[in-house]
Image (spheres, coloured by chain):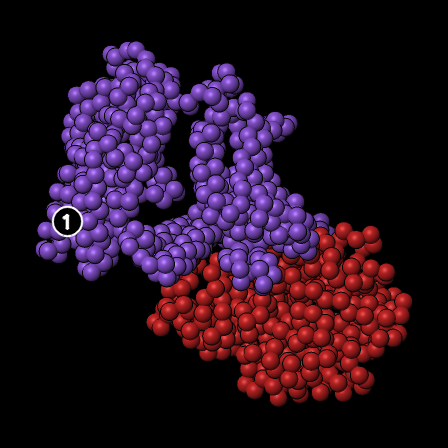
Chain colours: A purple, B red
């Protein structure tokens, strides 16, 4: 092979090699571009999917809210006529009835109450199942809770002809942190259950302070001497709709939700519920709940069980906002023995103006008011605080809306706490004392201390004025009803429901509540009947001597 | 034992490449007589008849089928493109028969039946398994799997891949003996005692809501979820719908209320009526979901596929694994294409594998289940002579 041929061959080989590499490079470039495009498309898709997920989340939240609203409405729609039935039954019981009529009425009232309890259970369980259960950890007084439970337990036991006992460690710290409403609900369910399945003997509630390695907890034991639960039924006793045998159901009615609700509530609070039962001997339900001692309590004397939970209040300057002046007077009277200065505003607009002018320690704010609602006023006050860089002022809502989980809605608006009307003096003091204890809060220039008076109810002297005002408002409702002005009827009824409750006139408060509901449903006949019932009751009350009014109240 | 030898070449000169491949096979075969084989090539615009002639010159008796592809797969070099690969079988216990279905899109079932009968006559025994290599472009609107079921029955395992053309989507070629076809389907039947284990690896993952195909005919979807198919795809691919890569994002099509789904790649958009043409049939009233395509999931699925077929042959390794992998998988995998066979490489002994990237895969989800046409999958078929 000549040199020329050799070089030619080498050149050809090199050209092939270069061609091969060029092809590989070109493929690689194409592949790279394609992969970038696929990556871009994947990213685009991921964004699209994320947006869809976001939309789905919003829809799910809306659906959940709609369900909650539906449940809330159901609660109103079913309970309102039932409450009227029960209220009317209660009024009827006060009239002259012969023994047969009394017997019929008793059956009617019993069945009505039973139905109300069933509806409450079903609604409560639905709310829990829908995820609407919110556990709130707040300071509360265990003694107050137990006093209420004792009253309920005793009442239930007496009606059934059995005994009720409450046992509590004498030196137990009473100021605790937990969800007192849910604890009360659990204990009530267990007591109700114990009474239902006990025909003779005793039901008891014992409370023990446990201090295990997992932190302080309370052990509540609800025991009865009832029929007991067979071993094979015990594993399912906390399942929903779990019931005993058919023959028991006929005498002890229920849908089997009480224990299921209790179990879920206890679990939600981080506790445990256990059962010990023997057929023929009775049952014991043991509820262990983490209920820590409130910080203030831990530092103080443990003998405080004998002392009223809130007996002292720092000097304060507060603003009370309510369109009904008599409500303001309730607050004023509740705080009469303390060094607390109370200013009054009749609506939200006036409250905002006074807030700008004075330096308050707290505001008690009604929600529904003419001119400007409480919530709008709170929003404005929070805006002013933000703009002017002011420390947030404690604002406590006063409302007759009693759905527990709505409290978080109020918190979202800007309220620090909610007082449900009618509230007791202790509840008011407890709420206010929480904010006087907060460090760094600027106080207005008032000083001194005062003790709670345990004397006569300071509101009693005001009741004649309340009744007089109530009579006037009833006439106002009558006029509004003639004009078919249901909006006005609702407004006045709502305000009067709260006012009557604040003065302990529970029957009137209940009737105004019924009136409000029937007006909301535009039920002419029921509204008129209720109005007449109210008119009659107020007239009766006003006939009594001033001295008797304290007894009538409550 | 089922023995096999193979060679692969990506020489710039396709014919030279085939010569190299033939020489490689010959050197491995020694004095053994080749019985049957697969020839796959991703070299385009080439004289395929000359390529086949080169093979037959060396192996005149070989029962050969093959096709053009979108890349070759061999355990020798992994993934190669613009290459040619030849696999040759020989066995004392297994027999082979070949046939070809011509004019496939014209009258598919009679054509397939003729091809099957040719192969049956050539085999002269009861078939144990069948491999088919239909045209991947002319058959897009044909329910290939339904015809295969009808012709091959529901007992004979049928596997294969649709012929490709280097992702140009113009024309594919099929080979049977020394003849070159288009719009055809070569058939290779295996007879004798042979163990088969197969698995179908799917990469794209359906996600999100289920939608309803409102109107469809054959492989064209007109309306999905109350809007045109085009508007439906635009929802989640937006401006990228213009790009060719849209075909890598298939629809998951659920049929008969089952959880099993078929993947259908969109290949053509008609902007006038908003319809979209898919590779494979889209049934009217079927439920569909969108899919996401990632390299990781594609590789994971291949790994699972390899593990599944090998675990079925735990006591004795397969003699050979055939792979029919969708062209979209290799485009999605890009520089990581070679990792698709890592599951086969990781076994104790080197397992020979051979296959190609195709325009649709053929196989059943499980033994005894009807043969189906798939997209975006990799069909693993492990073969082993029943007697060692």
Lateral position of residue B351 relative to residue A246, left or right: right
Q: Is residue B166 visible?
A: no
- Chain designation of label 1: A
Give the position of the N terminus of chain A as an image quadrant: bottom right
Work out whether A444 lies above or below B125. Answer: above
Q: Give residue A332's quadrant in the image.
A: top left
In depth, the one of A244 and A372 nearer the eye is A244
Work out whether B275 lies above or below A94. Answer: below
In depth, the one of A331 and B324 nearer the eye is A331
Work out whether A390 lies above or below B2. Answer: above
Residue with the mark numbered 1? A477
| Secondary element at image label 1 | helix
The residue that appears at 40% across and 64% down in the rendered structure is B232
Give the position of the C terminus of chain A as an image quadrant: top left
The residue that appears at 86% across and 71% down in the rendered structure is B386
The residue that appears at 65% across and 45% down in the rendered structure is A276
In depth, the one of B42 and A401 nearer the eye is A401
The residue that appears at 26% across and 19% down in the rendered structure is A340
Work out whether B378 lies above or below A288. Answer: below
In depth, the one of B95 and A347 nearer the eye is A347
Lateral position of residue A158 relative to residue B116, left or right: left
Picture coordinates of residue A546 (x, y %)? 21, 33
Picture coordinates of residue B382 (x, y %)? 76, 65
Circle 1 crowding by C-alpha within 10 Å: few under 14, some 14–19, many from 20: many
Q: Give residue B179's quadrant in the image.
A: bottom right
């Amino acid at each position: 092979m000549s040199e020329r041929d050799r070089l030619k061959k080498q050149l050809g080989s090199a050209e092939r090699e270069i061609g091969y590499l060029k092809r590989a490079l070109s493929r690689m470039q194409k592949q790279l571009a394609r992969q970038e495009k696929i990556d871009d498309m994947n990213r685009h898709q991921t964004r699209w999917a994320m947006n869809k997920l976001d939309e789905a989340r919003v829809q799910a939240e809306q659906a959940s809210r709609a369900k909650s609203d539906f449940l809330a409405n159901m609660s109103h729609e079913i309970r309102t006529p039932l409450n009227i039935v029960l209220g009317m039954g209660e009024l009827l019981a006060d009239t002259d009835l012969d023994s047969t009529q009394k017997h019929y009425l008793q059956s009617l009232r019993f069945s009505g109450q039973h139905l109300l309890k069933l509806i409450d259970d079903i609604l409560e369980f639905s709310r829990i199942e829908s995820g609407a259960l919110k556990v709130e950890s707040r300071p509360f007084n265990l003694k107050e809770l137990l006093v209420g439970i004792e009253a309920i337990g005793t009442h239930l036991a007496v009606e059934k002809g059995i005994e009720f006992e409450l046992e509590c460690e004498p030196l137990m710290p009473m100021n605790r942190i937990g969800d007192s409403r849910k604890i009360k609900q659990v204990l009530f369910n267990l007591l109700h259950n114990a009474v239902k399945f006990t025909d003779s003997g005793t039901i008891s509630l014992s409370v023990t302070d446990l201090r295990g390695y997992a932190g302080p907890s309370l052990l509540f034991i609800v025991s009865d001497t009832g029929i007991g639960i067979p071993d094979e039924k015990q594993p399912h006793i906390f399942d929903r709709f779990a019931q005993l045998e058919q023959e028991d159901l006929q005498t002890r009615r229920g849908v089997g939700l009480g224990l299921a609700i209790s179990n879920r509530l206890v679990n939600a609070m981080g506790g445990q519920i256990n059962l010990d039962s023997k057929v023929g001997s009775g049952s014991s339900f043991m509820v262990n709940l983490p209920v820590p001692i409130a910080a203030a309590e831990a530092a103080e004397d443990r003998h405080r069980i004998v002392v009223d939970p809130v007996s002292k209040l720092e000097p304060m300057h507060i603003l009370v906002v309510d369109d009904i002046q008599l409500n303001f007077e309730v607050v004023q009277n509740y705080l009469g023995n303390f060094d607390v200065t109370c200013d009054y505003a009749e609506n939200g607009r006036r409250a905002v103006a006074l807030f700008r002018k004075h330096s308050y320690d707290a505001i008690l704010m009604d929600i529904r008011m003419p001119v400007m609602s409480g919530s709008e006023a709170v929003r404005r006050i929070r805006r002013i605080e933000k703009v002017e860089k002011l420390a947030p002022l404690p604002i406590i809502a006063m409302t007759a809306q009693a759905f527990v989980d709505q409290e978080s809605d109020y918190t979202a608006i800007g309220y620090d706490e909610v007082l449900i009307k009618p509230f007791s003096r202790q509840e008011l003091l407890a709420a206010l004392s929480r904010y006087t204890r907060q460090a760094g809060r600027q106080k207005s220039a008032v000083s001194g201390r005062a003790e709670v008076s345990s004397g006569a109810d300071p509101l009693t002297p005001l009741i004649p004025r309340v009744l007089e005002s109530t009579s006037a408002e009833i006439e106002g409702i009558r006029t509004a009803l003639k004009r078919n002005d249901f909006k006005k009827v609702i407004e006045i009824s709502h305000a009067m429901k709260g006012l009557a409750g604040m003065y302990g006139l529970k029957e009137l408060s209940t009737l105004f509540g019924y009136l409000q509901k029937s007006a909301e449903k535009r039920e002419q006949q029921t509204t008129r009947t209720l109005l007449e019932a109210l008119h009659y009751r107020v007239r009766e009350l006003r006939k009594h001597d001033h001295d008797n009014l304290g007894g009538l109240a409550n | 034992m089922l023995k096999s030898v193979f060679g692969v070449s990506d020489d710039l000169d396709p014919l030279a490449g085939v010569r190299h491949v033939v020489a490689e096979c010959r050197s491995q075969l020694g004095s053994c007589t080749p019985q049957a084989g697969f020839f796959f090539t991703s070299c385009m615009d080439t004289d395929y008849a000359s390529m086949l002639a080169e093979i037959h010159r060396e192996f005149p008796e070989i029962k050969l089928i093959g096709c053009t592809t979108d890349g070759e797969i061999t355990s020798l070099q992994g993934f190669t493109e613009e290459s040619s690969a030849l696999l040759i079988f020989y066995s004392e216990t297994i027999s082979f028969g070949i046939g070809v279905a011509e004019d496939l899109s014209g009258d598919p079932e009679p054509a397939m039946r003729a091809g099957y009968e040719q192969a049956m006559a050539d085999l002269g025994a009861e078939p144990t398994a069948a491999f088919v290599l239909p045209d991947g472009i002319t058959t897009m609107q044909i329910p290939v799997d339904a015809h295969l079921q009808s012709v091959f029955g529901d007992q004979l395992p049928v596997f294969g891949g649709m012929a490709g053309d280097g992702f140009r989507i113009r024309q594919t070629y099929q080979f049977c003996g020394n003849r070159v076809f288009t719009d055809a389907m070569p058939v290779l039947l295996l007879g004798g005692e042979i163990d088969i284990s197969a698995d179908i690896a799917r990469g794209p993952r359906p996600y999100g809501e289920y939608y309803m195909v409102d109107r469809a005919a054959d492989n064209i979807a007109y309306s999905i979820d109350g809007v045109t198919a085009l508007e439906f795809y635009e929802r989640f691919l937006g401006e990228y719908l213009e790009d060719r890569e849209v075909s890598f994002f298939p629809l998951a099509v659920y049929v008969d209320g089952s959880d099993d789904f078929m993947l259908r790649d969109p290949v053509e958009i008609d902007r006038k009526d908003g319809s979209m043409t898919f590779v494979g049939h889209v049934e009217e009233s079927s439920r569909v979901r969108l899919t996401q395509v990632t390299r990781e999931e594609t590789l994971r699925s291949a790994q699972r596929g390899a593990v599944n077929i090998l675990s079925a042959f735990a006591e004795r390794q397969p003699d050979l694994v055939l792979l029919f992998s969708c062209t979209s998988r290799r485009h999605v995998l890009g520089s990581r294409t070679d990792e698709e066979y890592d599951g086969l490489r990781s076994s104790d002994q080197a397992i020979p594998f051979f296959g190609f990237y195709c325009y649709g895969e053929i196989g059943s989800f499980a033994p005894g289940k009807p043969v189906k046409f798939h997209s975006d999958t990799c069909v693993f078929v492990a073969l082993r002579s029943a007697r060692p």
